[in-house]
Each structure stands twice: as C-alpha cells, then as structure tokens.
Amino acid sequence: MTTQQTLKEVREAITAANRALDSLENAQRELKGAKNWGLLDLFGGGMMTTMFKHGHMDKAQRQIEDAKYYLQVLKKELRDIEVPMNFNIEVGGFFKFCGSLF
C-alpha cells in the first residue's frame, strides 16, 4: 500500500470516527431532552408532554443507530490500514544476566 493510499484510509477512518462521535453527542442531547420532558411528565404533564418526550427518545434511538453504523465503517477502515510491525528488541548484557538468574 502506498503512502497516499494509507493517508486516504486514515482520513476515512477519522471521518467515520468523527461521525460516530457526532451521532453519540446528538443522542446524548436528545436523551437529556427526553429526561427533562419526562420529569415534567411525572409532575402532571399531559399527552403533549409525553409526545415530546417520546419524540426525543425516538431521535436518540436514530442517532444511536447512526453511531453503530459509523463504528462499523470505522472498524472496516481500520482494517484497511496497514501498520508495519517489523521491530527488533535487543536484550543487553544486564538483562541476559538477570535472565540467567531465573
């Protein structure tokens, strides 16, 4: 894989991660809205209050589904990125000495 291809895959992974994060933040905002309407509903809201609460919950559910989708895209993009894993570990004299004690 060329450097350009790797950079493209990294950008795609970052985009997917940002979209997943945005979706989760939107879901959090909708759930807070549902919580507020839920408290009002507890203390004598009415049909409209319940409707608003459930509207926020439905929007939060859609945002969570979007986040799941983007996390799957992120997983795929991360698999596309090749990270070289060729490194060597040199063991010095002190470690060889310690190893011989055990």
Image: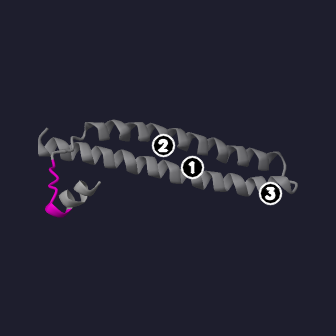
Question: Of label 2 and label 3, which has the lower sequence position?
Answer: 3
Foreground: disc 2 or disc 3: 2
For disc 1, the marked residue is: 27
- The image position of residue 102, as x and y in percent, is 29, 54
Please provide the residue range marked out in magenta.
Answer: 87-94
Q: Main secondary structure of the magenta part?
A: loop
Q: Residue at x 48, y 39 (%)?
A: 68
Q: Nearer the viewer, residue 89 or 99?
A: 99
The answer to whether marks 1 and 3 mark residues whose Cβ atoms lie closer than 8 Å is no
The answer to whether marks 2 and 3 mark residues whose Cβ atoms lie closer than 8 Å is no
- The image position of residue 56, as x and y in percent, is 65, 47
For disc 3, the marked residue is: 40
Find numbered disc 2 in the image and state the secondary structure of the residue it sits on: helix
Mark-to-mark CA distance, 2 and 3: 29 Å
42 displayed left or right of 14: right
For disc 2, the marked residue is: 67
